[in-house]
Amino acid sequence: MPRKAKKSQTKKPKPTSHTKEEILALIEKVSAARAAGATITKALEEVGVPKTTFFKWRKKFSSPAPKAPAKKSRPKPRGKGEAAARAVLDQVAKLCKMGETQAAALRQAGVSMSTYRYWLKKYVAGGAAKAVQGVKRASVGKREPVLNVLERMTENRKKRQELDNQIRDLDAEFEALRKQLGK
């Protein structure tokens, strides 16, 4: 039976052990570096401690996690606001009245179609249906019939809602008359 080769005689250097006070001092140095804005990796490189060791120490000695400095940030304002939206809506309407297509007018105003429709719905009484009346559209080929059907569907939904309201009113009136006759 062949003999096994002996392991090399060179040993890895044993990691130096630290006292509890030294460990706490290293944790404080890392916390100070983090407070100054350094990343955890950079802070640990400065101290010379591996990440895993640091996290074991922190867990063992119950020190809170070093946090990054709090950034003072204000919430960013979203959107252009009502006044700017109305100005763009007016600009697009003027361009459309001058003969521009809606798509060309929106391109000149620098606004997407979805944003334009959203603003119409939000800021114009009657919404998009009212603003679209009389607007010259670019020829859209196969989409034209679809757009016409969608416009008719929108009009029909409004008419249906009006009829539902009339039926509801008539039902209430009918019930009131029935109660009077039942007395």
Image (cartoon, helix red, strand yellow):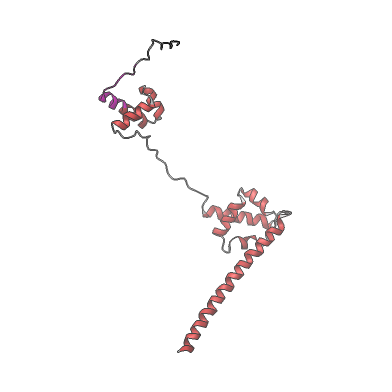
Q: Quadrant of residue 166?
A: bottom right
- Front residue of 9/130: it is 9
Residue closest to the eye, 169 or 74 = 169
Asked if residue 33 lies left or right of residue 118, the reply is left
- The answer to whether residue 110 is above or below residue 67 is below
Image quarter hosting the N terminus: top left
Residue 32: x, y in percent? 33, 29
Count of numbered circles on the image? 0
Residue 52 percent coordinates (x, y)? 38, 27
Residue occupying the point 67% across, 52% down: 103
The residue depicted at 52 percent of the width and 82 percent of the height is 174
Whether the magenta-drawn stretch holds residue 7 is answered as no
Q: Quadrant of the C terminus?
A: bottom left
Residue 138 location in percent, x, y?
A: 71, 54
In-image side of 64 versus 177 (left or right):
left
Q: Quadrant of residue 62?
A: top left
Asked if residue 59 is positioned above or below residue 5 in the image, the reply reads below
Highlighted range, magenta: 14-26
Is residue 6 or residue 52 the one in the foreground? 6
Look at the picture and state if 108 lies above or below 53: below
Q: Nearer the viewer, residue 117 or 105?
A: 117
Residue 23 painted magenta: yes
Quarter of the figure with residue 29: top left
Residue at coordinates 51% horizontally, 81% vertically from top-left? 173
Q: Is residue 164 left or right of residue 65?
A: right
User: Residue 97: where, in percent of width, then height?
Assistant: 68, 58
